[in-house]
Image (cartoon, rainbow, N blue to C red):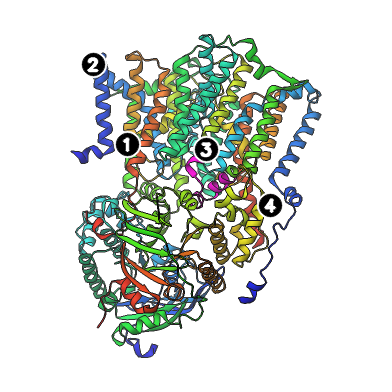
Amino acid sequence: MAKLLKNREILLVLAIIVLVFAIALRFPGFIEPANLARVYNDTSILIILALGQMAVILTRCIDLSMAANLALSGMVAAMINAAFPGVPIPMVILTVVALGAALGSINGLLVWKLDIPPIVVTLGTLTIFRGTIFLLSNGAWINAHQMSDAFKALPRASFAGFPILSWLSVAAIAAIYVLMTRTPIGRAFFAVGGNPHAAVYTGIDVGRTRFLAYCLSGALAGLAGYLWVSRYAVAYVDIAAGFELDIIAACVIGGISIAGGIGSVAGAVLGSLFLGVIKNALPVINISPFAQLAISGTVIIIAVAVNARTEKRKGRVILKKAEAV
Amino acid sequence: MAEAHLSPRIIPDRLRSRSSRALKSWESLLLVVALLIFAFNSFASPYFLDPWNLSDATFNFTEKALIAFAMALVIISGEIDLSVASIIALTSTAMGLAVTMGADTPVLVLVGLGTGLLCGMVNGLLITGLGLPSIVVTIGTMSLFRGLSFIILGDKAYTGYPESFAFFGQGYVWWVFSFELALFVVTAIVFGVLLHKTNFGRSVYAIGNNQTAALFSGVRVGRVKFILFLLTGLMAGIASICLTSRLGSTRPSIALGVELEVVTMVVLGGVSILGGSGTIPGVVLAAFIMGMVTFGFGLLNVPGIVMSIFIGVLLISVIALPILWSRARRRMAH
Amino acid sequence: MLQETTPLRMKPAITLEGISKSFPGVKALSDVSLSLYPGSVTALIGENGAGKSTLVKILTGIYQPDGGTIRVNGIETQFPTAMAASRHGVTAIHQETVLFDELSVAENIFLGHAPRNRFGLIDWKTLNGNARELLARVGADIDPTIRLRDLGIANKHMVAIARALSIDAGVVIMDEPTAALSHKEIHELYELIDRLKADGKAILFISHKFDEIFRIADRYTVFRDGGMVGEGLIADVDQDRLVKMMVGRDVGQVFPKVDVDIGEPVLTVSGYRHPTEFEDIHFELRRGEILGFYGLIGAGRSEFMQSLIGITRPSAGAVKLDGKVLVIRSPAEAIEAGIVYVPEERGRQGAIIGLSIFQNVTLPSLHRTSRSGFLKLANEFALAREYTQRLDLRAASLDQDVGTLSGGNQQKVVIAKWLATQPKVIILDEPTKGIDIGSKAAVHAFMSELAGQGLSVIMVSSEIPEIMGMADRVIVMREGRIAGRFERSELTAEKLVRAAAGIVEAA
């Protein structure tokens, strides 16, 4: 039992269950399956983004530009749809996923080839991406009536009782899970962050691995861009402003170490769900939605403090008797 | 060996004179760039050279530069503080709250300074007390501090600051010289002296270049870093007093994204983002350059968000260019 | 000699010929040759700094030799990267294993060459199965699915060996593999090495412990000062001859040790212990004395010294300086009290590269050179000039970045830095490690001069000639405990080596 409690994922599942029941005490409707499904659907985009951020953080980097990438990709998706309503939606999605990956690859190249610290690179591209949206759109909004019905309908369309949006996030979780656990590149993400020095010995190119992590986070931001714009049926410069912090919060809560090498798909998903439950519960239990930012911040700090405690390494053991534990 | 001891070699203190070194520095490059932009602006717009217009232009950078001086020290020491814009917001909110409770100008200033210091203390304790990475901590406090403003203010705004409070952001000390500009000059001198002329400043460089060796050499690393975060909080508080006074109102979204401009200013000023090197004169010049570029864009009616593209490109290129430059030089040497 | 001892029928798995390697200011290896034979264990013996680790790094593709050739199975080749060495079947098991703490044991064995299924995905079932098989082959009872960080050092070694087997390495380098193992574990390792031999692996075994060299090695090679001074069959030598080859030169001649009148006790340490690093350390240090601390790498000497100046906290113990009890919680307090520590790792803990020579020298003394917190450059230059001259520093100017100096001159700056604080006790941790002969002599001369002036010196050193040449008294540490105390008059190299390696007086 004690060992189970040390497991971050199980701890998070318990925390989420306690949270959900606590809310249900004051608002029984919260725990109804339909509402829980709605909460999951609301959290889907965050989950998709957190999966990408996870890959980047695992390699000892960070991507602050994900939300800006999402906004730019979303705007491009909306503009394509507004200008050429005939283009099939899967085409649009493929385009923005490719666009997102290309934007992510800019981050990756700067980190890989020029060795610029990831935080600086992505702070810079964050503003560049936002500015580019303005240049593309001239500051104008693209509203619901400019978008085709098919464009708006996809994430809402129901399949086997659940919205496509939820299904897409499930698919993303499954795909990233396979990528992270069953492919060499997925394992390389862990190796590069865990011990870059040793990774070189095993023939892993550290810079290239980081580049690929950024491409992945970019592609997922691109996908999230379409989903966001079609779901809320509006695109403008500031959509998802500040959302990069939620994404990082989800990862940090999920036990993904900012120092790299430690983390899991389950952690990213559960961290997102934890935030998602809080976000959906606030209006229900009559706390101002304005409190959400402060809560995210507090949770980030608590989570990073907890992570730091669990990651503390043992010193060097010289005395023999101390070793015999 | 014995001979060497009998006649020890005399090692000169300095080889190159200070002036020859200054000529090759990043700062002199910045000075040239600043002069070029100044010249370009004066040709591009007939309104630029008007003293009152120039005075207006300084408001584009003074508040950010106040924070940039403290941030320069933080970055030289190898850390970063991304929460400064949120400290501005929380400080401004605290002052607005004080106004609704009937506080007058001196109390407002105290509230402003106090809130800034308190925020800096929170950062400092988390980073040096618990040993957490500053980048994540300040991303956290960045949400926390602004989040608190949102909780207090929601979608409302505070206005109704006393008339005398307007002096900090709108007052003039003499002719076209504003209070903010005067404060900028005084702060630049104070931080310049602190970094370049005191034991404390030397410790900051030592920590930034090699924290472990600095610790072994008896530098009280934790204390120095704590003071740096405290100072950054204080400067953000002062900047918040100026900004709130200039705008005459507080909204929770005040100063959104300013941390990026501050970091860019510091890096443009020649401070290494990896820590260990940089100067206050460099940051002063970078502040002038960014202010004049912003003002020039304004004269040309370029919208603010496009300016942010420029800032983003600037941030990346000022770090990338020296790297590419040294690589090119190495390649030529081979 | 070579002809007599070479098994003529057998071709070497790998041959190094005329390998040289220099670093700025130091010649690490000069014209070294070595052959490793399949099914045979070659012991590589030498003092610290003799060039063993440089050779290992060349063999594993981390360093490139300046000259010489490498032949694998008779074919001349090069190891431009670690990967290339590994592809040629050369693998090393280091003292500090370079593996991934957060990944599973099985994955550590197979990272980079994991078995895949027909969809190209990693086949964990096969992987874990293969890992289990390999672990069984090395005789380790480890669950391959647990995380590496949950293993002790001994088992991590087993994992590293299993990894070596998984890439089917023909040449296995073991760099002090038993340094951190218990008696039982060492025994298991011997059995494993016997099995590897039977498998036809060529093994290079680096060790300071003679009992194990005689237990498992077939051949030996002795290095001294970057050169090879002897090789042959283990059957043809005894321990005394190996020790003599290792220590070699006529000690005591090059060292400018002057006899000083040793005064009253200055520093008294009693009952010092730490939960995992050292225990029961007690000694006295007298005025004008040079006290040597000898031991193998990892014996806990640096750990103890660092706890003395407040980097780590001891769990118990008392320090008295000039009869007064001291509580030291940070290096700053130690410096204030008059105890300074010149650390072993010059680049990481000593020199602050990026700051100039004078800024480095004055850093711990700023409170003396400055006035009310403001720097006084003239005072700083004066202080830096005084101490750098006393240490015979070679530099173009005091304003120069220490990063531009050679290792030896950097070390002089580092020593000057701590001396300028005018301490009562100075602890020098491997003061001449990795620096050139000229700088070594300057450091030794100065150390002697200091003791003559009444300073008390603790010198941590792993170099026997240095210890024998400089110390008035020697404490030997082994596995975190004091393993022997010797007066200068009774010192012999053999005694030191035996005490450090834990060999009972040989017959």
Residue B52 pos. (x, y %): 77, 21
Quadrant of the snapshot with the C terminus of chain C: bottom left
Q: Chain of mark 4?
A: C
Residue occupying image coordinates x 25% and y 17%? A24
Determine crowd level at label 3: few under 14, some 14-19, many 20+ residues with C-alpha closer than 10 A. Answer: many
Q: Which residue is mark 4?
A: C378
Q: Does residue B219 belong to the magenta stretch? A: yes
**Residue B56, percent from left and from top:** 72, 22
In the rendered image, residue B173, in percent from the top left (x then y), is placed at 73, 21
Q: Which residue is mark 1?
A: A267
Q: Nearer the viewer, residue C496 or B247?
A: C496
Label 4 to label 3, Cα distance in Å? 33 Å
Element class at badge 4? helix
For residue C363, side relative to residue A211 (left or right)? right
In the rendered image, residues at marks 2 and 1 fall on the same chain: yes
Q: Amino acid at mark 4?
A: Ala
Q: Which mark is residue A25?
A: 2
Q: Mark 1 is on which residue type?
A: Gly
Please state which of the two labelled residues, at mark 4 or mark 1, is closer to the viewer: 4
Mark 1 vs mark 3: tell me if same chain: no
Q: Chain of mark 2?
A: A
- Chain ID, mark 3: B
Q: Where does the magenta region start and end?
A: B202-227
SS category of the residue bearing label 3: loop
Depth check, mark 4 against mark 3: the one in front is 4
Rounded to the nearest angstrom, the CA distance separating label 4 from label 2 is: 73 Å
